Image: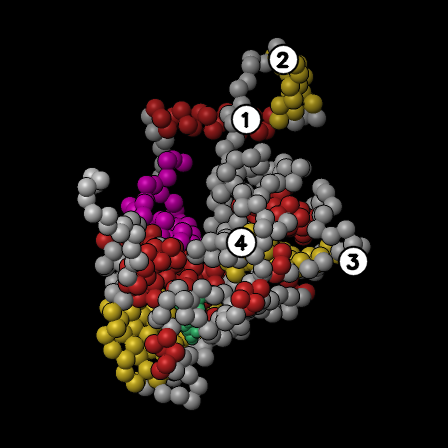
C-alpha cells in the first residue's frame, strides 16, 4: 500500500458463520472430539443411558442417543447459538460449575462443520427435529420421540478441506472414538453405554455393572482380575479408584484413566505420580493400567485451561503429586518415600482398603459432580516436580517408553562362584557380581539374534493353536499388521 492510497479499514468483524468455523477448530479438531462434546452433553442432561454409533472413523457419521432431560422446541433452536448454554448464567456461576460443559460452543461449532440433526423431547412434551447443513438451518419440525436427545453428525469437516486432510485413517480415528467411549464408560457408575462402529458393537457396559465389571469390559479380563483398590483421604482431597497389577504393564499410558472432578484428563504430572507410587514394582519405561478419581475442592483446580477441557491446572501441583504417589504406594503395598505435604493436619488418613471382593460397594457411587473453580493465578508453566523427583523416571517424556541405556562392559576375569548363583569377576574398574542365570539367558538371546540375522531360525507351526484374547484396540493393531509376520523361530 502506498501513502497515496485512501486509508481503508483493515480490521473487520468476522461474520458469525466464520467465527463458528474457527471455534470449531479449537474444540472440535477430530471426530473423537465431537463424540466427547456430545457425550458430555448427554451426561450433563442427566442421561444414564447413552448409545453411540459411528461409521468410517466418525467422518461419515457420529450418532449419540441419550435418555436425558431433552429440549423443547425453543431450546432446540437456542442450543445452536454461539455461547448459548443452560449451564451457567451469572459470573458467579463460574465458581461452582456442576457440569462437564460450560462454554456453550460445542453444538454451533459442530453444526458449522458438518450436516447436523438434533431430535429432542423433554418429559411429557412433543418431540422436535432440527436439521442444519454446514451451519445453515434447513428445518425444524415436530416428530415422535421419547424423552431424550439424539444428535446425528454427518460428513464432518466436508466444508473444511484443510481440517479434513489432517484426519487420519478411518481405523485410527475409530480407535480415538473408542478411547473416548471407554473413558466415559469408566467415568461413572450406573451409566449404560454402548458403542457401535460400522454396525458392530465393540463396547457395552450396563448400568448395573460395578467398576470391576466395567474395567473388565474396557480393559479385559487380565487387568480386571489383578485390580487393587485405591483409597486416600486428605483435607479437601479424595483419591479413589483401581490399580492394575504391575505385571500387566504397557509401554504407553493408553490404559491409564484419570478423572479430576469426574472429568477425564490427560496429565503428565498425575501420570508421573502414579509411576512414583509403583516405584520399582514397575519396570522402567512401562505404565500400569489404572482408573483413578481425584475429587478435590474446586478452588484447588482450574478446569478452564484447555479448548477441549482435557487438561486441568492444579493450584498446588506438588501437593497433588505427593498425595497421589503416597496413595498409590500405600495401595500397592510399598512404604511411601515421603509424607505427603497435601495437609499437615493429623486428620490425613492413608487407607489400605480390603480386596475388591470384600467390598463390592467400593466406588460404586458416581464421582462427585464436577465444579468450576475460580480463576487461579498460578503460573501456567509446566508444574515443577517435588524435590524428591521420582526414581522411576529421571526426566524423560513420561508418555513414552523410557529406553534403558545399553550397558557397555569391559572384559572380565572370573574369580569365584558364590551361592551357586553369582560369579565374582574382576575388571579394570573394580569387582563385578554377575547373576549367572541372567547372563546365560542373555548369551542365548544374543546367539538367537545372531542366527536370526544370518541364517534365520527354524520354526514349525504349533500342534495346538494358541488363542489370544484381545481388546478391540489390540485387535485393530493386530489387523493392521496382517498378514501376521509369523514368529521368528522355535
Ligand atoms: P454447553 O454444553 O457448554 O452448554 P453446548 O453447545 O454443548 O454447550 O450445548 C448447548 C446447550 O444445549 C446446553 O447448555 C444444553 O442446555 C443443551 N443441550 C445440548 N445437548 C443436550 C442433550 N443431549 N440433552 C439436553 N440438552 C442438551
Ligand atoms: Mg456441551
Task: Please tell me whether mark 3 or mark 4 is closer to you in this view.
Answer: 4
Residue at 49% in and 47% down: 253
Mark 1 element type:
helix
The residue carrying mark 1 is 440
Residue at 31% in and 58% down: 13
Distance (Cα) linking label 1 and label 3: 52 Å
**Tag 1: Cα neighbours inside 10 Å, few (<14), some, or many (≥20)?**
few
**Cβ–Cβ under 8 Å for marks 1 and 3:** no
Magenta span contains residue 486: yes
* Mark nearer the N terminus (2 vs 3): 3
**Percent position of residue 477, x then y:** 36, 49
* Mark nearer the N terminus (1 vs 2): 2
Q: Which segment did they paint magenta? A: 461-490
Mark 4 element type:
loop
Task: Please tell me whether mark 2 or mark 3 is closer to you in this view.
Answer: 3
Mark 3 element type:
loop
Task: Please tell me whether mark 2 or mark 4 is closer to you in this view.
Answer: 4
Amino acid at each position: 500500500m502506498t501513502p497515496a492510497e485512501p486509508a481503508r479499514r483493515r480490521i473487520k468483524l468476522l461474520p458469525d458463520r466464520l467465527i463458528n468455523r474457527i471455534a470449531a477448530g479449537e474444540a472440535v479438531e477430530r471426530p473423537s472430539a465431537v463424540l466427547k462434546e456430545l457425550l458430555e452433553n448427554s451426561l450433563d442432561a442427566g442421561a444414564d443411558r447413552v448409545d453411540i454409533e459411528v461409521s468410517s472413523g466418525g467422518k461419515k457419521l457420529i450418532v449419540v442417543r441419550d435418555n436425558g432431560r431433552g429440549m423443547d422446541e425453543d431450546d432446540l433452536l437456542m442450543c445452536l447459538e454461539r455461547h448459548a448454554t443452560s449451564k451457567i448464567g451469572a459470573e458467579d456461576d463460574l465458581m461452582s460449575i456442576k457440569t462437564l460443559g460450560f462454554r456453550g460452543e460445542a453444538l454451533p461449532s459442530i453444526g458449522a462443520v458438518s450436516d447436523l440433526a438434533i431430535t429432542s423431547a423433554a418429559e411429557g412434551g412433543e418431540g422436535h427435529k432440527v436439521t442444519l447443513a454446514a451451519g445453515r438451518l434447513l428445518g425444524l419440525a415436530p416428530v415422535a420421540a421419547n424423552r431424550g436427545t439424539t444428535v446425528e453428525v454427518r460428513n464432518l469437516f466436508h466444508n473444511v478441506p484443510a481440517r479434513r486432510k489432517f484426519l487420519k485413517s478411518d481405523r485410527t480415528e475409530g480407535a480415538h472414538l473408542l478411547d473416548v467411549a471407554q473413558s466415559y464408560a469408566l467415568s461413572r457408575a450406573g451409566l449404560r453405554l454402548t458403542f457401535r462402529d460400522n454396525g458392530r458393537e465393540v463396547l457395552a457396559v450396563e448400568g448395573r455393572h460395578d467398576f470391576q465389571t466395567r474395567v473388565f469390559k474396557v480393559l479385559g479380563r487380565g487387568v480386571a482380575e489383578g485390580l487393587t483398590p485405591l483409597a486416600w483421604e486428605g483435607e479437601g482431597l479424595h483419591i479413589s479408584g483401581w490399580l492394575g497389577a504391575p505385571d500387566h504393564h504397557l509401554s504407553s499410558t493408553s490404559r491409564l484413566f484419570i478423572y479430576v472432578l469426574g472429568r477425564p484428563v490427560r496429565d503428565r504430572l498425575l501420570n508421573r505420580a502414579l509411576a512414583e507410587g509403583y516405584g520399582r514394582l514397575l519396570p522402567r519405561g512401562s505404565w500400569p493400567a489404572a482408573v483413578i478419581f481425584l475429587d478435590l475442592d474446586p478452588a484447588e483446580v482450574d478446569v478452564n485451561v484447555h479448548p477441549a477441557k482435557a487438561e486441568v491446572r492444579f493450584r498446588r501441583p506438588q501437593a497433588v503429586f505427593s498425595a497421589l504417589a503416597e496413595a498409590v504406594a500405600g495401595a500397592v503395598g510399598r512404604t511411601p518415600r515421603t509424607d505427603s505435604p497435601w495437609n499437615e493436619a493429623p486428620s490425613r488418613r492413608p487407607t489400605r482398603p480390603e480386596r475388591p471382593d470384600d467390598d463390592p460397594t467400593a466406588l460404586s457411587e458416581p464421582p462427585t459432580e464436577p465444579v468450576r473453580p475460580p480463576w487461579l493465578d498460578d503460573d501456567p508453566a509446566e508444574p515443577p516436580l517435588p524435590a524428591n523427583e521420582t526414581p522411576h523416571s529421571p526426566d524423560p517424556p513420561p508418555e513414552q517408553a523410557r529406553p534403558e541405556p545399553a550397558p557397555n562392559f569391559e572384559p572380565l576375569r572370573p574369580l569365584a562362584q558364590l551361592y551357586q548363583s553369582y560369579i565374582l569377576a574382576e575388571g579394570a574398574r573394580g569387582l563385578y557380581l554377575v547373576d549367572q542365570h541372567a547372563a546365560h539367558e542373555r548369551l542365548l538371546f544374543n546367539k538367537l539374534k545372531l542366527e536370526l540375522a544370518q541364517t534365520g531360525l527354524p520354526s514349525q507351526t504349533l500342534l495346538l493353536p494358541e488363542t489370544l484374547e484381545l481388546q478391540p484396540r489390540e485387535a485393530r493393531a493386530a489387523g493392521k499388521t496382517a498378514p501376521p509376520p509369523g514368529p521368528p523361530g522355535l
